Image (spheres, rainbow, N blue to C red):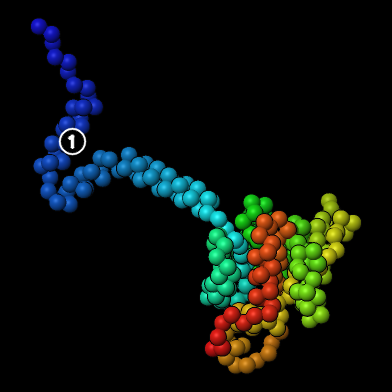
């Protein structure tokens, strides 16, 4: 007669744990499970989260996009409502694609971790996840340094460029400036051009570039500059131009 094979130690322990689990009641069952299986449970949950995040990234990456805008303002205001109005007008033509606004990118050279901001912006630009930047002077200077600003005399239609130029809104600057081994700026590699729109005096700037206390008191202190830049490697130039036109020529929001 063939001798019956003895169950493995793992099976014996599993059966014992299962019998113990069945005898427990209420919260004791959950406590028992956590005490004995928290490591594999944690690993399983972590793997599920990683897979879900990765799947979400792939899904988001497949979505058609019309415009990706980064707003780095001088104030703590959010301009999301303005962009919702702009998105309605832009997408009224029925073309597919979403308009994305990112207000979570900090950029401040007074912050000791500014180099992390530089890495984040460089990565975003190089991966073509930024079409237009509405930004403070610090971020504008960095975009110039990495030569990420498209010259506006080639990017904008002639009528819009001429209008903005006549209104004194075109910012002339030097891109691609390098620092030599002595820490001095080497101007020999610099590229002069008209790289940004200075938004001073626009409805957008009036709404989102003035501190609340200045608005409420009616004081007229000098504001920090706010610029609009078209990123040089954008694949959505027409929609980027539409945003520049809206920022400089339209008031999308009703008077408050």
Q: Is residue 1 toward the left or the right of residue 94 in the image?
A: left
Q: Which residue is drawn at 84% across and 53% down?
A: 180
Q: Residue at x 35, y 45 (%)?
A: 45
Disc 1 residue crowd, few under 14, some 14–19, many 20+, Cα 10 Å: some
Q: Residue furthest top?
A: 1
Between 222 and 91, the one nearer to me in the picture: 91
Between 4 and 231, the one nearer to me in the picture: 231
The N terminus: image quadrant: top left
Locate residue 205, reporting x and y percent.
65, 80
- Specify whether residue 168 is in view: no
Locate residue 124, reporting x and y percent.
63, 55
Between 33 and 220, the one nearer to me in the picture: 220
Q: Residue at x 56, y 88 (%)?
A: 255
Asked where in the image residue 130 lies, by quadrant, the reply is: bottom right
Q: Name the residue under label 1.
A: 17
- Specify whether residue 35 is in view: yes
SS state under label 1? helix
Q: Is residue 231 toward the left or the right of residue 68 in the image?
A: right
Q: Is residue 218 toward the left or the right of residue 31 in the image?
A: right
Locate residue 111, reporting x and y percent.
64, 65
Locate residue 218, reporting x and y percent.
62, 93
The C terminus: image quadrant: bottom right
Q: Residue furthest front?
A: 93
Asked where in the image residue 93 lies, by quadrant, the reply is: bottom right
> Is 76 located above or below residue 175 in the figure?
below
Q: Which residue is drawn at 85% across and 60% down?
A: 191
Asked where in the image residue 220 lies, by quadrant, the reply is: bottom right
> Is 26 located above or below residue 161 in the figure?
above
């Amino acid at each position: 007669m063939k001798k019956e094979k003895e169950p493995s130690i793992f099976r014996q322990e599993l059966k014992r744990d299962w019998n113990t689990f069945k005898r427990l009641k209420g919260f004791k069952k959950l406590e028992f499970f956590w005490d004995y299986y928290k490591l594999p449970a944690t690993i399983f949950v972590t793997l599920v989260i990683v897979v879900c995040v990765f799947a979400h990234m792939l899904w988001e990456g497949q979505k058609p996009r019309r415009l990706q805008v980064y707003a780095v303002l001088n104030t703590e205001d959010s301009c999301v409502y303005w962009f919702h109005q702009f998105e309605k007008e832009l997408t009224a033509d029925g073309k597919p694609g979403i308009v994305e606004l990112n207000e979570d990118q900090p950029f401040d050279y007074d912050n000791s971790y500014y180099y992390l901001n530089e890495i984040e912006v460089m990565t975003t630009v190089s991966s073509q996840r930024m079409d237009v930047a509405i930004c403070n002077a610090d971020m504008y200077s960095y975009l110039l340094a990495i030569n990420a600003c498209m010259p506006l005399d080639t990017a904008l239609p002639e009528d819009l460029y001429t209008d903005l130029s006549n209104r004194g809104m075109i910012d002339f600057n030097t891109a691609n400036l390098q620092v030599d081994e002595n820490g001095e700026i080497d101007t020999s590699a610099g590229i002069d051009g008209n790289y940004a729109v200075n938004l001073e005096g626009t409805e957008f700037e009036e709404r989102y570039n003035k501190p609340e206390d200045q608005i409420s008191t009616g004081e007229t202190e000098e504001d920090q500059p706010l610029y609009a830049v078209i990123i040089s490697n954008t694949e959505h130039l027409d929609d980027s131009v539409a945003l520049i036109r809206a920022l400089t020529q339209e008031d999308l929001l009703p008077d408050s």
